[in-house]
Amino acid sequence: MLRTFFATLAFMSRLPVPYRWSQGLEVDQYSRGIVVFPWVGMVLGAIAAAVFVLLAPWCGTPLAALFYVLALALLTGGFHLDGLADTCDGLFSARTREKMLDIMRDSRLGTHGGLGLIFVLVAKVLVVNELAVRGVSMWPVLILASVVGRSAVVLLMYRQRYARDNGLGNIFIGKISLSQTVITLLTGAVLFFLLLPGAGLLAWFITTLAIALIGHAIRRTLRGQTGDTLGAAIELGEVIFLLALL
């Protein structure tokens, strides 16, 4: 399990994970790593939360919130943000399904993708600052913000169809079992129960439901999911969770 965790951490982040820690795990076996997605989110969230907590007394909560968001983007290499931008470009293009998928594969940033990025990044900074101003305990909130999307995203994998013929998303989409789905969701719920009971659990439920609905809408439009839509779900999950705490 540790090998799977480190392989998944290396796959989903830019952290320098030594190759020997994940050696022997083939790419087509990465679907096993879905059950550790919440733990990967916890590691990334803890690092980014530390940035906020350390900087807030020195430069104030607005700038600390900005550097928190920057830290998350750097930790993931903009992996999920890229998926969000591509998904926005494709889905809001008002084209045919095939054209949407072609647009999503295009590496160039379009108007809708740019607007989506601006909205999500600005929303994160503003909501994190507002929560801090209201006196919310930021350590668990910022850690769990990175957990919720990475646990709920399993709903866009289980019993889903991959919308393309090939791509990174094909590692997970349609390859996740019911037991893996339940374990992933329960892990997220338990972490919320331990770190932020009460309002945190309610926000977890709202976010998980919202991601399920977003996934359903995407499935109806694209007749499946892609790696880009998984990244978009993770990013939107963070924003929805933070908003649900207001």
Image (spheres, rainbow, N blue to C red):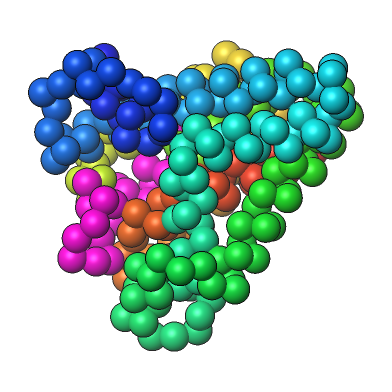
Question: Which quadrant, please, contains the N terminus?
Answer: top left
Q: In this view, does 164 lie above or below 243?
A: below
Picture quarter containing residue 215? bottom left
Q: Does the magenta stretch include residue 225?
A: no
Residue drawn at (77%, 29%) of the image: 64
Q: Residue furthest bottom?
A: 95
Asked if residue 244 shows in the view, the reply is: no
Q: Percent x, y for residue 47?
A: 56, 21
Query: Horizontally, is 168 left or right of 136 in the view?
Result: left
Asked if residue 4 shows in the view, the reply is: yes
Magenta stretch bounds:
151-171
Q: Does the magenta stretch include residue 157?
A: yes
Depth check: give the residue in front, 133 or 107: 107
Question: Which quadrant, please, contains the C terminus?
Answer: top right
Q: Is residue 16 above or below residue 32?
A: above
Q: Percent x, y for residue 160?
A: 28, 56
Q: Percent x, y for residue 170?
A: 22, 52
Query: Horizontally, is 97 left or right of 140 in the view?
Result: left
Query: Horizontally, is 214 left or right of 26 in the view?
Result: right
Q: In this view, does 136 lie above or below 129?
A: above
Residue drawn at (49%, 45%) of the image: 78
